Image (spheres, rainbow, N blue to C red):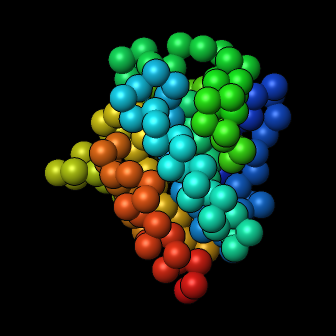
């Protein structure tokens, strides 16, 4: 199975088909509304605004597995992100990124690119995976890496 074979559930039971992402540079982030890293939503949106017309997209995956920092339902998450951070990039249905109920996107991502010390599990909110125009995971960053810090990598892939 490759990146373009994946699908993710959107709020309201719709499906986001990754086949629609062919030829785009994609950043996938597990997000939460009540985390110390939540202000990164602003930086993510700035990155999205800067490159969305050049073939770049961000997909947010709300997750409540880290300190219970995403307790709301999909509607509450969407409202929070729109009102507080002006988020316009797609947010998937809240799901797990670790454990028995890990969504299929994160199962695939973690199998492609391990994190620090070769660990595959997601350590905390706002870990980032960057996928090139051919559906390859080319980078994985920890929560502490700001969206601004990855701007150059996004730009390089868009020019490739």
* Residue sitting at the far left: 117
For residue 25, what is the image quadrant?
A: bottom right
Q: Residue at x 60, y 14 (%)?
A: 72
For residue 98, what is the image quadrant?
A: top left
Q: Residue at x 67, y 39 (%)?
A: 86
Answer whether residue 7 is visible to the viewer in this image: no
Query: In the image shown, does 82 or 160 lie closer to the viewer?
Result: 82
Image quadrant occupied by the N terminus:
bottom right
Q: In x, y percent, where is residue 160?
A: 55, 86
What is the number of callouts on the image? Answer: 0
Query: In the image shown, does 127 or 145 lie closer to the viewer?
Result: 145
Q: Is residue 113 left or right of residue 22?
A: left
Q: Residue at x 49, y 80 (%)?
A: 156
Q: In x, y percent, where is residue 128?
A: 43, 50
Query: In the image shown, does 113 or 89 lie closer to the viewer?
Result: 89
Answer whether residue 160 is visible to the viewer in this image: yes
User: Taking 155 as reference, is 93 above or below it?
Assistant: above
Q: Is residue 92 left or right of residue 127?
A: right
Q: Is residue 55 left or right of residue 134?
A: right
Q: In x, y percent, where is residue 82?
A: 69, 33
Q: Residue at x 66, y 59 (%)?
A: 49
User: Taking 97 as reference, is 72 above or below it?
Assistant: above
User: Taking 97 as reference, is 89 above or below it?
Assistant: below
For residue 90, what is the image quadrant?
A: top right
Q: In x, y percent, where is residue 9?
A: 71, 35
Q: Is residue 15 left or right of residue 113?
A: right
């Amino acid at each position: 199975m490759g990146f373009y074979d994946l699908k993710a559930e959107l709020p309201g039971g719709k499906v986001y088909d990754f086949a629609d992402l062919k030829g785009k540079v994609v950043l996938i982030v597990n997000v939460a509304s009540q985390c110390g890293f939540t202000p990164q939503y602003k930086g993510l949106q700035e990155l999205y605004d800067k490159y969305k017309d050049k073939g770049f997209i961000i997909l947010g995956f709300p997750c409540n597995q880290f300190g219970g920092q995403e307790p709301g339902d999909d509607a509450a998450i969407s409202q929070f992100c729109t009102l507080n951070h002006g988020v316009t990039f797609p947010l998937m249905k809240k799901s797990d990124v670790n454990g028995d109920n890990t969504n299929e996107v994160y199962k695939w991502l973690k199998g492609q690119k391990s994190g620090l010390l070769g660990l595959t599990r997601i350590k905390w909110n706002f870990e980032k995976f960057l996928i090139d125009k051919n559906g390859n995971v080319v980078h994985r960053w920890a929560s502490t890496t700001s969206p601004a810090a990855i701007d150059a990598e996004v730009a390089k892939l868009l020019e490739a």
